[in-house]
Amino acid sequence: MKKALLVVASLLAVSSVMAAMAFSSATVKNDANFSIVDTSGALLAIEAGEHQAAGYEERNDGAEVLVIDFDKGKDGQEYGLQPNSEYTWIDLFKVTNNSENSVDLTIDFEPSESEDDRDLTDADVEIAVNIDGNWKQIDGSDNSITIPNVDPGTSKSIDVRIIQNHDEQTEGESGDDNGLRNFQIVVSAESN
């Protein structure tokens, strides 16, 4: 019994000395890597639907990214939207969570930063987004929609509706720039 007590006391003494010898800083190198891939094959994958309006554009690094051009129609031609009209693109694009965690997805409509572009949220244009049967109006106070708890491997199809309430072009405006809207659709995810 005395031997066991002596061994325990010795171990405590040695561990106290070792704790006093602990380092105050360290640097450890580890290998790490990542790949630049097409937007449709990323951890947060974004895939074009079966519309001419949604397609891919190759960047300088060779990866393809989703590009949405609401003016495109038959054979990829540019047409545009006429005044007093409403257009809906069902399954315009799809977002898939390929990460290992459940995430909250946010889809944000960011207006152009160019002074030459008309604001996305002008009174004569309405944009709404439908996810899982719930349409949400995008307006100047809140240009985003959040989809909570998207599990790994789960996809969400995104529908977009644009309502153009502009009756006529004002004097001095040409048909080419009357109502032109440039904006970005930003998809982000936050682990929950």
Image (cartoon, rainbow, N blue to C red):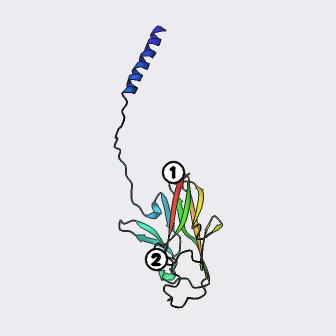
Circle 1 SS class: loop
Up-down relation of residue 30 to residue 7 (above or below): below
Distance of label 1 from label 2 (alpha carbons): 41 Å
Give coordinates of residue 2: x percent, y percent: 47, 8
Residue that carries the numbered disc 1 in the rendered image: 100
Circle 2 SS class: loop
Residue that carries the numbered disc 2 in the rendered image: 115
Furthest residue in direction bottom, as rendered: 171
Give coordinates of residue 181: x percent, y percent: 51, 78
Furthest residue in direction top, as rendered: 2
How crowded is the residue under tag 1: few (<14 C-alpha within 10 Å), some, or many (20+)? few
Give coordinates of residue 158: x percent, y percent: 57, 67
| Kind of residue sitting beneath label 2 | Glu
Residue beneath the point at 48% across and 78% down? 117
Residue beneath the point at 47% across and 12% down? 5
| Kind of residue sitting beneath label 1 | Glu
How crowded is the residue under tag 2: few (<14 C-alpha within 10 Å), some, or many (20+)? few
Point out the frontmost of discs 1 and 2.
2
